[in-house]
Amino acid sequence: YKIFDFGRTAKSNTGLMNFKSRWGTSSSDIVHFNFPSNGENIPRENTKAYDLVKLIFRVAPEALTPILGNFCYRHMG
């Protein structure tokens, strides 16, 4: 491949940003707007709920991650 997209990363995720930079990547800022049609709040990465989910995924057995991922996708957006 001549171009490979490593995907977007939150600026607060310095570890992942550092990892990607070691592959010779370049970065650019992305402006992102969310307008939920159902009027619900948009989940944010800087909440206690998000921190709890990260902790659960860190300690959960790998075999459970697909089940947990599907649950989070359905209930957290």
Image (cartoon, rainbow, N blue to C red):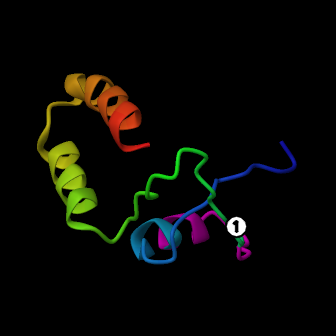
Closer to the camera in the image, 77 or 51:
77
Q: Is residue 7 above or below residue 15?
A: above
Residue at x 62%, y 59% (from the top left corner)? 34
- In the shown orientation, is residue 21 left or right of residue 18? right
Closer to the camera in the image, 17 or 22:
17
Residue at x 12%, y 44% (from the top left corner)? 59
For the stretch drawn in magenta, what is the main secondary structure? loop
- Residue projecting furthest to the front: 39
Closer to the camera in the image, 6 or 29:
29
Quarter location, residue 15: bottom left
Quarter of the picture containing the N terminus is top right
Residue at x 33%, y 25% (from the top left corner)? 66
Q: Amino acid at mark 1?
A: Thr
Could you say where residue 4 lies in the image, as x and y percent from the top left?
A: 76, 49
Over which residues does the magenta segment extend? 18-29
Q: Is residue 18 above or below residue 55?
A: below
Mark 1, residue position: 25
Magenta segment includes 61: no
Q: Is residue 44 above or below residue 5?
A: below
Q: Is residue 69 above or below residue 28?
A: above
- In the shown orientation, is residue 7 left or right of residue 60? right
Quarter of the picture containing the C terminus is top left
Judged from the image, the secondary structure of the residue bearing numbered disc 1 is loop
Residue at x 64%, y 54% (from the top left corner)? 7
Magenta segment includes 20: yes
Could you say where residue 29 lies in the image, as x and y percent from the top left?
A: 71, 76
Could you say where residue 70 lies in the image, as x and y percent from the top left?
A: 36, 27
Q: Residues within 10 Å of mark 1 (few under 14, many from 20)?
A: some
